[in-house]
Image (tube, rainbow, N blue to C red):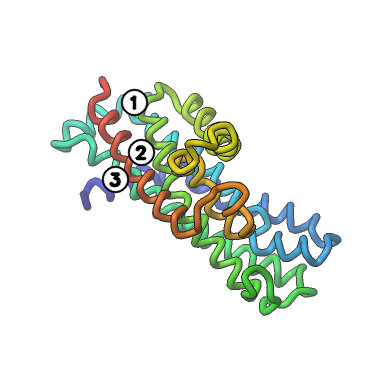
Amino acid sequence: MGQLLQQEIFKFRHQRLAWLAPVILVLLMGGLAATAHGASISDQKFYISSAYGGFQWLMILMIVIGASCVTMEFEYGTIKQLAIQTNHRWTIFVGKYVLLLGYSVLLHVVAVLTTLLLKFSGGRSLSWQTVYLYHQALLDNLVTNAVLDTYGGVLIIGLVFLLASCSHNSAAAIAIGVGVCFMGEGVSSLLLQSFKSLLPVMKWNPFNMFFLQEEYGNPSYQQNVTHLTIEQLSVGNLLWALFFVGVGALIFSRRRI
């Protein structure tokens, strides 16, 4: 697995998007920060704690990169060489997944550091010790949101990898991935409202787990939307992530090359 990861890192380092993603992320965050100076104090707190929208943009970038990372092996035929070098093709899939999780952590660090710089340069009206959600300091809220978003990405990246293992080109995998990940919350809400008698079971659907970070920012979601606690959403994220990665690895290993 160690040698396989080294190969994946080498290939990843030569992907243009892997180097462009942090630049794109910083530019998008800077654009929002530039328009947020005239916002109310409450809105400024929200923008800062959410990394000036960086966490949302970051996940889109991860979907694009993750889908491309899997499908490109079949598009360019490099999967044949990889299959010869390893006895179990599923290890290739898992290696890519682990690499993307590490890259997600790196991008979240970039988002937090960029938020600190943007706050220092243009948001001095608010102190980092300003109390925000859960009676915590604004800096604590930013870090907590970064951790929750990173953890939630474990599920989303797993789902994108599963979709990519079933797709024949990256464009289709990206389109489906973005659609599922950003419409999933609406689908979950519709299911819970339509099948109230099955609520004890339906509330554990995978799309409901996407609300993890939103419920942290809006505690009322537990009663009105998810019907699950933060702890339950955390466990659900991990279980569904393992399921998606397991199924995706199985499909990846049996796919014709």
Nearer to the camera, 191 or 110:
191
Left or right position of 122 against 71: right
Q: Tags 2 and 3 in contact by the CB under 8 Å rule?
A: no
In the displayed structure, 257 sits above or below 52; it is above
Q: Secondary structure at mark 2?
A: helix
In the displayed structure, 135 sits above or below 108; it is below
| Residue identified by numbered label 3 | 95
The residue that appears at 42% across and 49% down in the rendered structure is 237
Nearer to the camera, 114 or 163:
163
Q: Secondary structure at mark 3?
A: helix
Q: Nearer the viewer, mark 1 or mark 3?
A: 3
| Residue identified by numbered label 1 | 74
Question: Where residue 16 sits in the image (x, y, percent)?
Answer: 49, 41
Q: Secondary structure at mark 1?
A: helix
Crowding near pointer 1: few (<14 within 10 Å), some, many (20+)? some
Looking at the picture, which amino acid does disc 1 mark?
Phe
Q: Which mark is residue 244?
A: 2
Left or right position of 251 against 204: left
Specify the quadrant of the image occupied by residue 232: bottom left
Nearer to the camera, 148 or 23:
148
Identify the mark nearer the N-term, 1 or 3.
1
Identify the mark nearer the N-term, 2 or 1.
1
Left or right position of 29 against 126: left
Looking at the picture, which amino acid does disc 2 mark?
Phe
Residue 42 seen in render: yes
The residue that appears at 82% across and 62% down in the rendered structure is 37
Instruction: Using the numbered discs, state the Cα–Cα distance from disc 1 to disc 3 in whole angstroms.
Output: 16 Å
Residue 24 seen in render: no
Crowding near pointer 2: few (<14 within 10 Å), some, many (20+)? many
